[in-house]
Image: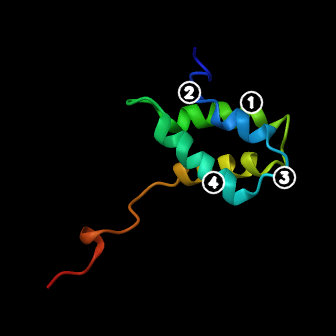
Amino acid sequence: MKKGTPEDPKGLVAEAYRIEGITPGECRTIFLDWALSLPDGSDSRTVLAVLVERHDLQAPDHPMTQVMREGLQAMSRTGRRGGWRSRPRD
């Protein structure tokens, strides 16, 4: 029996909205689990945009909505954040 949708394969995001009193920290944990459960080759930014659009109107103040918005915003940033190539060399 299949539980979720193509955007939410395990139904984790949908379940987060059903948990009364859920905290932002718990939502971040669920978000990470959601991201790791996406099928290989999925465009996570596109999938996340669909989820934000789906839930933003229904529950704009929910912690899960905020976490997903933050995730989408972070994915929009371009450029490297660091690593060995960004460090000065002799």
Circle 1 sits in a helix, a strand or a loop, which is it? helix
Q: Badge 3 local density, few (<14 within 10 Å), some, or many (20+)?
A: few
Which residue matches tag 1? 54
Q: Badge 1 local density, few (<14 within 10 Å), some, or many (20+)?
A: few
Q: Quadrant of residue 33?
A: top right
3D distance between C-alphas at marks 2 and 1: 15 Å
Q: Which mark is residue 28?
A: 4
Under mark 2, the amino acid is: Pro
Colour basis: rainbow
Under mark 3, the amino acid is: Gly
Judged left or right of residue 83, residue 72 is right
Q: Percent position (x, y) of residue 79?
A: 41, 58
Q: Do the CB atoms of the residues marked 2 and 3 lie less than 8 Å apart?
A: no
**Residue at the spot 57% in from the left edge and 32% down from the top edge:** 47
Mark found first going from the N terminus, 3 or 1: 3
Mark found first going from the N terminus, 3 or 4: 3
Judged left or right of residue 13, residue 59 is right
Q: Percent position (x, y) of residue 11?
A: 64, 30
Residue nearest the observer in this picture, 37 or 53: 37
Q: In this view, does 77 lie above or below 85?
A: above
Which residue matches tag 3? 21
Q: Badge 4 local density, few (<14 within 10 Å), some, or many (20+)?
A: some
Nearest to the eye among marks 3 and 1: give it: 3
Mark found first going from the N terminus, 2 or 3: 2
Q: Which mark is residue 9?
A: 2
**Residue at the spot 68% in from the left edge and 54% down from the top edge:** 26
Q: Is residue 87 above or below residue 29?
A: below
